[in-house]
């Protein structure tokens, strides 16, 4: 499976969640949301989806994604966006929502891998 399609799906998932929670509820600018989404999508895709998920199971990967999301969102808000309005509660809610989405994203990743295996066997 190529990395582009799942990466775009993850970027859309993360951007949607962060736009709703941090953008609408906490007033983070859309540029800030995009910056945070890009950093989080890349880091969580390569660490969580390409390293942790294949070595463990979906639940362990979701827990890892929650911890990673919490840390990245908090650090980006703290150092890059300098958004004082985002509280730890906001970061926690955003990380929990992303982790919930990650559960389904991992199922999608598994289905995409099976589809590509079947296609390669047919050729």
Image (cartoon, rainbow, N blue to C red):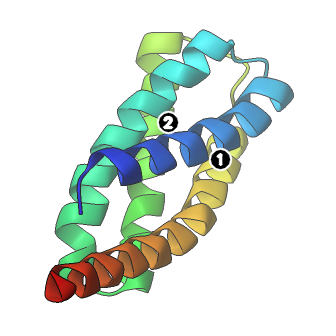
Q: What residue would you read off at disc 1? A: 94
Res 51 seen here:
yes
In this rendering, the answer to whether 69 lies above or below 16 is: below
Q: Quadrant of residue 67?
A: bottom left
**Residue closer to the observer: 33 or 26:** 33
In-image side of 6 versus 26 (left or right): left
Q: How many marks?
A: 2
Q: What residue would you read off at disc 2? A: 73
> Callout 2 environment at 10 Å: few (<14), some (14 to 19), or many (20+)?
many
In this rendering, the answer to whether 92 lies above or below 63 is: above
Res 83 seen here:
no
Give yes or no for contact between labels 1 and 2 (Cβ–Cβ under 8 Å): yes
Q: CA distance from mark 1 to mark 2?
A: 8 Å
Q: Residue at x 68, y 44 (%)?
A: 17
Q: Residue at x 20, y 87 (%)?
A: 122
Residue with the most extreme right position? 25
State the quadrant of the N terminus.
bottom left
Q: Quadrant of residue 18?
A: top right
In-image side of 114 versus 17 (left or right): left
> Callout 1 environment at 10 Å: few (<14), some (14 to 19), or many (20+)?
many
Q: Residue at x 34, y 50 (%)?
A: 44
In this rendering, the answer to whether 9 lies above or below 79 is: below
Q: Position of residue 19 (x, y in %)?
A: 71, 31
Q: Residue at x 22, y 52 (%)?
A: 46
Q: Position of residue 58 (x, y in %)?
A: 40, 83
Secondary structure of residue under mark 2: helix
């Amino acid at each position: 499976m190529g990395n582009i399609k799942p990466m775009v799906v993850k970027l859309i998932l993360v951007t949607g969640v962060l736009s709703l929670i941090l953008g609408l509820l906490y007033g983070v600018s859309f540029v800030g949301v995009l910056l945070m989404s890009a950093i989080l999508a890349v880091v969580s895709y390569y660490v969580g989806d390409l390293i942790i998920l294949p070595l463990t199971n979906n639940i362990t990967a979701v827990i890892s994604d929650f911890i990673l999301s919490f840390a990245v969102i908090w650090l980006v808000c703290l150092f890059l966006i300098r958004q004082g309005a985002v509280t730890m509660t906001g970061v926690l809610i955003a990380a929990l929502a992303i982790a919930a989405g990650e559960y389904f994203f991992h199922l999608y990743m598994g289905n995409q891998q099976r589809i590509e295996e079947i296609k390669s066997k047919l050729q």
